Image (cartoon, coloured by chain):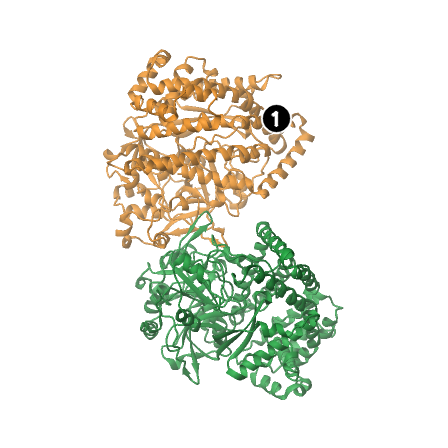
Chain colours: A green, B orange
Amino acid sequence: MRTGSNTLLVCLLAGALLPLARAEEGMWTFDNLPLKQLKEKYGFTPTRQWIDHVRLSSVRFNDGGSGSFVSPHGLVLTNHHVALSQLQKVSSEKQNYVASGFYAATRDRELKSPDLEVNVLMSMENVTSRVMSVVTPGMSDQNAFQARKAEIAKIEKESLDKTGLRSDVVTLYSGGEYWLYRYKKYTDVRLVFAPEQGIAFFGGDPDNFTYPRYDLDMALFRIYENGVPVESKDFLRFNPKGAHDGELVFVSGNPGSTSRLDTLAQLEYQRDSWLPLVIRTLQRRSGVLKEYSSLGTEQAREAKTKLFLLANSLKALGGMYNGLQDPKLMARKEASEKEFREIVATQHPEYAAAWTEIAAAVKQMASRLDERFALSHSSNLTGTAQTIVQYVAEIKKPDGQRLPGFHDAQLGSLRFEMFSPAPVYPALEQVELADDLSYAQQLLGPRNAYVKAVLEGHSPAEVAAKAIQGTKLADPKVREALVKGGEPAVDASDDPLIVLARKMDPFSREFIKWREDNVESVLTEAGQKIGKARFAAYGKSTYPDATFTLRLSYGTVKGYPMNGTIAPPETTFFGLYDRATSFGFKPPFNLPERYIARRDRLDLFTPLDFVNTCDIIGGNSGSPVINRNGELVGLIFDGNIESLVGDYIYDIETNRAVAVHPGAMMEALRKLYDAPALLNELEAPAQSSVATK
Amino acid sequence: MRTGSNTLLVCLLAGALLPLARAEEGMWTFDNLPLKQLKEKYGFTPTRQWIDHVRLSSVRFNDGGSGSFVSPHGLVLTNHHVALSQLQKVSSEKQNYVASGFYAATRDRELKSPDLEVNVLMSMENVTSRVMSVVTPGMSDQNAFQARKAEIAKIEKESLDKTGLRSDVVTLYSGGEYWLYRYKKYTDVRLVFAPEQGIAFFGGDPDNFTYPRYDLDMALFRIYENGVPVESKDFLRFNPKGAHDGELVFVSGNPGSTSRLDTLAQLEYQRDSWLPLVIRTLQRRSGVLKEYSSLGTEQAREAKTKLFLLANSLKALGGMYNGLQDPKLMARKEASEKEFREIVATQHPEYAAAWTEIAAAVKQMASRLDERFALSHSSNLTGTAQTIVQYVAEIKKPDGQRLPGFHDAQLGSLRFEMFSPAPVYPALEQVELADDLSYAQQLLGPRNAYVKAVLEGHSPAEVAAKAIQGTKLADPKVREALVKGGEPAVDASDDPLIVLARKMDPFSREFIKWREDNVESVLTEAGQKIGKARFAAYGKSTYPDATFTLRLSYGTVKGYPMNGTIAPPETTFFGLYDRATSFGFKPPFNLPERYIARRDRLDLFTPLDFVNTCDIIGGNSGSPVINRNGELVGLIFDGNIESLVGDYIYDIETNRAVAVHPGAMMEALRKLYDAPALLNELEAPAQSSVATK
């Protein structure tokens, strides 16, 4: 599943290597679309109107996915697995919408998401020169980093004050460019429709990241503002015919992160340090959740979404790890880096040191990577407690000097998350916190200062029991009151989870500061050198690595060679029943009841899923697939197993994006879910589609 | 497709390495079944009755496949692609049974195959000591080889005279054992049923050797003797339920050849010399046939079966080649050979030289491999002409001194083939002969003696035109008359193809003699040493390499990890329609008309194909899959892509045999082919099945 929600996957900044974008490769920013390639290969030139229409129809789900407006009344289409966290939060022991699905036949039954923020990209402004201007010759990497950080916070704050729009400065091309992205921000997002997880995620973990596939991985939300649905003038009209084999299509969405411009040293760091430890960590967490799930039905329900996300990340990370083990991939990277460094050595010797600087910085990072993981939390509530402790301290400082995430322009979204009324599962939190502490002890040893400070001679289980059983933080009002009381209230609090978070806080701060000074600042400076060298040598002929900002990919509907044969461009409902029957309807190949009872109603020839060559990555989940006419012809929900090296390289031969076909969505809504109102809305007149010659 | 019909794939004799058979590995001879493993793992001990029943129900198709009796009236089930050569031979420009299928609703409409011989294994006798006794200490390898060859011919002739049964001495365990196999031989084999090739080979070359699969690769023949159907007391009763996931099943059939006991030197020879050249040769022949096919519908029909067989071989050979390129496979072989050689060096130093002797022999073979291919024919008629020229000369010699294939005991089958009334396509023969000559010229150079002798200064096209356009050999009566006239008639013949074959003959003889003296005799002696060393060290705990003789494999119905997910144990008719629709019904994913028109009649839940862990290889095509009760629960037709390294190693994780489900065969016969008589016969009472506790 192509979510970008795994927060552990923060990519190290910066990088190098020039992959001259090959055919259909690229996650292009909307200011720099591959117009030449589109014209030459497909005779298609999108108009300004087309580009704006696509951008304004695209929606970012801030918990890690993408989506699009599909009606003029704020209806937004995304994946079931993007909606999953919210489905979990609106469910209860008695009403499990994850399993049973949900449909609001009328607007008054639509279910408000507790903490979902979605964004629409309203404008982009190049602020490179302003950001770069604050760095003066002779400044240390550390001072330059802090100066840049302060300037970025300032730009964001000014923009927010001026426009009221969410304002993010985005670093592109390893620091070669900085852009101010302004978003319309929505926080009243209501669930309209979700099918059963059994059909959305049919085939479960085995089929995840593979194809042929038979999933109806869809969900519909409606965005409200001031208590009424927003008028979404720009929306993508459903074209139930989809796109035919070989047709040009586009994907507009928010790929989370890629490492295609990383240096060889960074890839080796990922291969030898980062990936082994992150995989070990997530496997451990997954084990903890499985054990918890085995305690009973309700425990299994509570853990299910987290387990899903962990399994998803583990499969993706495993594919990345295998990719980096491939000597051919590494040899290709090595050759390409060698070539680029030779050009730089001759033409821009002032940038030539960047590679060794980066190698030194990642070596630094590797030396304290255990701490990075020991200080992280699988317990959400512990994370929230730590955010509260830091929040009250940070907001007293000048904006430019705060910890990352606590700048003025970010506080609105942060508070929305911090005060979320989403349900808390204390028993689960306790198990997770106990394991976090136990893992820290294992990684750092019993005599480590952090371990001693948080355990104070007790066992992880004892500390976790005390902190979680005694805390009142599950109540969002308690959190609000603490934050309102500011630093004095937090300092004085005897809530045991706040007490624990206070013990953790200095270690967290020290680590962040150390990393900024020794890793990030060096990577930023060196990355910027490489970014400038790239522009000097090649101009802006390529695309930047993914940054969970809006990008456009293009490609065609196309099968590919697979395991000795060919994977077809699309699958059908026939295939769904084949695969379910093939496995004797055993989970995860069982079907929801209505798929059994109403099978005869379905036109089994209807295409269900399809593949295309558009270049996507985690975070693109829920992205619309769009045709030349600006219509919706698909819904991205995954990449195939061959695409898991997509973090590092794109290979048109086998890399495929997997999407739900609009015909299948409409067939299911009509024949299985009795949703005529929704169908009517999706079949609305074509006023919003854009024809382009 | 698991045919063993590619005559180019003659395996070099002998070999080494001891793969101690792992779970479910092994193609066991019926005298040495893995009873211990079966009892320990499955609590199953086949009775004598069970074993004999399975053996006597099994049928060998001498043009390269397997089959089984499925009714008491001589009805034999095999694959469509095993029947294919005969289907081609009984078809004509006006009546193309390959494409349209065939069904004889009554016995008088059953179609006699022109040159199909099938065999049933009646007895096996260990003749090792007799064969070995003729070799005396101090004999040269060459003399030993000739002595053994003469003794084998004598044993076969004696047995034939005594029993009237086809009698073959089979070399097992690299010459560690020799067995006399006696077969009941049938030559009146009539076609009863074959579906359209479009469904038998649905998915074509892309899907060949892959899974999941949706093929009805079946055909039914009836064996006649003295003009009436044979009474096949031993037959396998159809069990339409098939075998369930995890159930113990057996495969009884005739695997063609494997190289699992080969030495590392032999594998390197295959990798570096044999496979590259055989692949190049078959690709060239395939190209010639494609060009011929493009001339028109009738030309395409004539070439289709050959093209199919070439494509099949090329895909298999490609998989073998890739397997040998895998450094892990070679490292495993190397380690295992090292271990075995160390044991031999200590315990049986008298055998230790075998490996270097084999290495020297394959080096010899590699040195004249180009000639091996230059002397081979893709033109069948040229091959027959050469056989005639050699036949009349050979039968005048004492039996023991003849060329291989011309021994007394073999003459019946040889004449049956030589005088086949199967149609000859002269235009195709001419194109093929021209290319064979041109290829010889390319491989050996224009100044080579063979090339000069056959071309005599003319172009390959001219020589081929003259030979084929002027020959009368297309008429089987002309062939019979020539053979009847003996050497004088053949020597005096001015038939231009016989004239050409006479020019080729001395080169062929010289090459065969050279190979016997320099390669085969050395490999036989050395292989025997290794075979003896193996028995001495390990006893008879393993199985011999495949030799196109009857073997029993065992395993379970079982899916496997595939391309990031799991392949299911079985597929269904749903999947057939999914895959056809997925590719827009474009060939080779189009369906025969009745599958479109009568889709509604089918129970789409019916299992179509399934996989199991039984160890098979080319030649096993058409083998029955049998349950503990001795019932037919499947029809082997292929291995998956992961099994293509099966020539060298067996891997239970991913190596799978692919079979047609009996439920699908009966469903299709009932609902699509209106074949009630056939269904009645297949649903006959269970008198022939054997229950075993």
Q: Is residue B614 visible?
A: yes
Q: Nearer the viewer, residue B347 or B332?
A: B332
Using residue B681 as the reference point, say whether residue A381 is left or right of it. right
Q: Residue A390 placed where, x, y %?
A: 65, 79
Instruction: Name above or below for residue A270 compared with residue B619.
Output: below
Which residue appears farthest toward the right when viewing the image?
A447
Identify the amino acid type marked 1.
Glu
- Disc 1 crowd, CA 10 A, few/some/many (<14, 14-19, 20+): some
Which of A40/B534 is in front? A40
- Quadrant in which the N terminus of chain B appears: top left
Residue at the extreme front of the image, as rendered: A347
Q: Is residue B461 above or below residue A622?
A: above
Relative to residue A650, is residue B461 depicted above or below?
A: above
Query: Where is mark 1, residue-wise?
Result: B357
Q: Secondary structure at mark 1?
A: helix
Percent x, y of residue A597? 34, 65
Front residue (pair B243, B291) = B291
Pinpoint residue A201: horizontal percent, then vertical percent: 45, 64
Comparing A612 with A81, the one in front is A612
Q: Residue at x 59, y 63 (%)?
A: A531
Horizontal side of A135 relative to B77 (left or right) equals right
Query: Does residue A470 appear in the picture of this structure?
Result: no
- Residue located farthest toward the top when viewing the structure as drawn: B488
Residue A58 is situated, as x and y percent measured from the top left of the image, at 44, 71
State the image quarter where residue B429 is shown: top left
- A472 vs B577, left or right, is right
- Tell me the chain of label 1: B
